[in-house]
Amino acid sequence: MAPGLGHNELSPLRNEIDALGDSVDAPGGERGAARRFRPDHRFTIGLAVAASLVVLAGVILRAVQESAIETLKRQLEEEDRVSELIHRARTALLEARRYDDELSLSYRQTPPEAFDSRYLRPVAALLAGVRQDLGKLQGTVDDAQMLQDLRSVQAAIDQYEAGYTAVVELYRGMGAAAGGLEAQILDQEEQLRLSFGQQRLGTLAERLIELRIARSDYFSRHQAHDAEAVRAATQAIGRELAASGISAPARRALEALLDQYRALFERYAEAVEQVNERRAAFMKTAAEAAPRLDRVLSRMRSRRALADGGVSLNEVIGYAAGVGGLVTLLAAGWLAFAFRRSLAHAIEASVEFARRLERGDFSARVPEAGTPALRWLGAALNDMARSLARARDEHLGRLSTLQQEIETLRERLSEQQKAVEAARGVALRLEKEYARCAGDLAAALEDVRVRDRETMLFNEMSSLLHTCRNDREAFDVIDLYAGRLFPLEEGALLLLNAARDKLECLVAWGGLSPKSAGSFGLEACLALRLGHIHQVEDPASSPVCEHVRALGASSHPYLCLPMVAGGDTLGVLHLSFPSLKGGNGAADSLWERKRNLAKALADQIALAVSNIRLRDTLHRQSIRDPLTGLFNRRYLEESLRREVARAERTHRPLALLMLDVDYFKRFNDTHGHEAGDAVLRALGRLLRQSVREGDIACRFGGEEFVVLLPETTLEIARQRAEKIRDATRQIRIHRSGRYLDPISVSFGVAVYPDHGTSADALLNAADAALYQAKQSGRDRVMISLRA
């Protein structure tokens, strides 16, 4: 590059021209000057050579200007191409990022076979175009640093594509696995919700709703803080469950369900964490590509500005100065003087022009004055400045358009995010409301199911109680169904004894036992003393019945319900609730339901027991003699036929004793009917004490009695009759301050089949033997003579 012509180099010429001017103005100087500048042939040849050199310098300057203009045009085209390629590369990366964002949101709804066509192939095509553009760009630049940056960008894009492909495959695998895990997690939540509803655990149901909201946030956003919220919710449920008052088996079952839920969620969170880590790695790689593209563009612009503003201009000025210096040295002195001022001004203006362009001031202009060559040079430089200004304005316009598009995209994305957040909020509210309604519905359905089961059991128990023939059968039915109606409670049925002075525990279930309960006085139960239901929700602050302490259930809430039927108090139904605690609406509602069910059970038991005892009384009255308490003749006839049939079937003997009070009419006439009744009652007591279990003692009529002795031989029957006869003589009746005369009885004995094979025959044989004993002097035992 030729150096420019400065002030120091022009000083000798300036001094020489000034000295020539001074010699012309001096006196006598015209002749010396005339002689010194008289033209000759050498001078003429010098002028011709100088003129030729000036023309040659103009041609050279014109060629240099045209070369500079062509260079500038090529640089402008190169810059446009570089800017376009970089813009396309950035757009492709943004589009690839959009595909990645869409993938992270919708991978669960995408079938595995659609991942290639929807996510892999479009991004691969975009990145292939970016690599192709980068290859073209590398062929157009000659700066080593820029080439290195472009190669690093291409390597980052290759890493981006590899990481994106790996993440797509992870999402593909996770899409299928996540669906299954999410379904299992939702199923576990449903099981927990149903279990909490069955156990009436309202607080745990609310904690479960919080857990479902946190889990929904994590499923939609996959953020670490959402996962921590899910873990905190499961821990809160665990603590609430441990502090609940439910039974140990139910609590262990719920804890097992909760542990299964935790395990499923941790598997899901681990898979999400792997995907997030891999995605964060390749997103970091992708983020490095855009700054490198910006750095390439910045280097290109800086290089171009320097080339346009400084280097190209210095070359033009250097060539011009070099040629001008050569022409000036060869031309005559007066040409140097003529060009000195205008050339210096042009050089200074060009240098200032180049400096302003280097600073980015494209409004700088070079004065188009002086010689035609200088005017032409100034016009060319000014055209170059205007071209640079237009290119800058075009680039600024493109940049502004891109920024506006980015802002528009950001606004759309923000609106979409707001819409998504609003939709998520609505969805969460709906889900919470649905969970609440579903919980209420499940609780209602469970309550209906429980009530239906209780009604069914209650009806079954009522039907069976109506068929019971005695108290023992009724107590067995009550024991069976009371435990089903109150499976979590402890209970006992306490009835008044025959003397109506004590309560006896006849039925118990849960953890109670009738044998351990024993009997209690009437004052031991506050319900009997108060005459209404006695309910104790907190034994520590309420009076507790004595029989409850004896049963060992004084630390639990309980109910005591008097059982009354037809105005007659029969006993007390006691229920203890180890798992029931008061203090909330659900517990109060459960208290009310249990109380109503217990009241219905107590009423039903009282009615059944009363009916059984009434039937028993009526039956006893129909087969018992009211004076002696022995069976009557009607019962004797039924039993005799039954026992004869049994003896015939088993081939066993059956003995029949018929006895009559001796001289009873005379005793009755002498001492009165009350004394006669006292004798009959005493003889009835004696017969009841003398017979075995299975023997039947009956009042046959008046003062006659019959005793049936199944499986008894004739000899044993005679011995039993003698024993009773002896015992009869020991009876003493005390009336009016004195003992009445002793009594005696006569016996007639007959045995099946010796004396008869039918009921009537056996009865007649015994009657005949009795008549014989009467005829033989009374107070004796006679065996039937009838075969």
Image (spheres, helix red, strand yellow):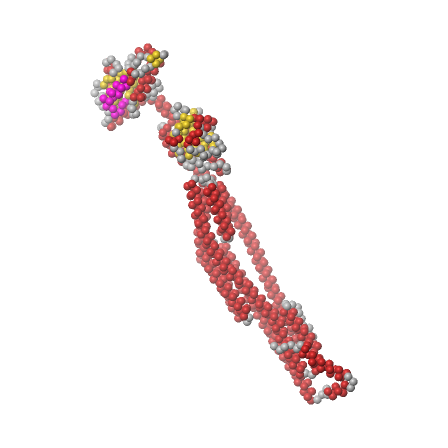
Question: Which residue ends up furthest to the bottom in the rendered image?
Answer: 41
Magenta part of the chain: 708-726
Magenta stretch: includes residue 354 = no
Please indicate, yes or no, whether residue 446 appears anywhere in the rendered image: no
Residue drawn at x 25%, y 24% is 712
Placement of 187 over or under 131, stated as above or below: above
Percent of width and height locating residue 412: 57, 56
Between residue 198 and residue 453, name the one nearer to us: 198
With 374 as the anchor, is 635 left or right in this view?
Answer: left
Residue drawn at x 44%, y 28% is 525
Please indicate, yes or no, whether residue 369 appears anywhere in the rendered image: yes
Percent of width and height locating residue 50: 67, 84
Between residue 5 and residue 670, name the one nearer to us: 5
Residue drawn at x 60%, y 65% is 395
Placement of 135 over or under 549, stated as above or below: below
Image quarter for residue 415?
A: bottom right
- Please state, as top left, top right, bottom left or bottom right, where the N terminus lies in the image: bottom right
- Please state, as top left, top right, bottom left or bottom right, where the C terminus lies in the image: top left
Residue drawn at x 65%, y 75% is 377
Percent of width and height locating residue 454: 42, 35
Report how many numbered discs are placed on residues in the image: 0
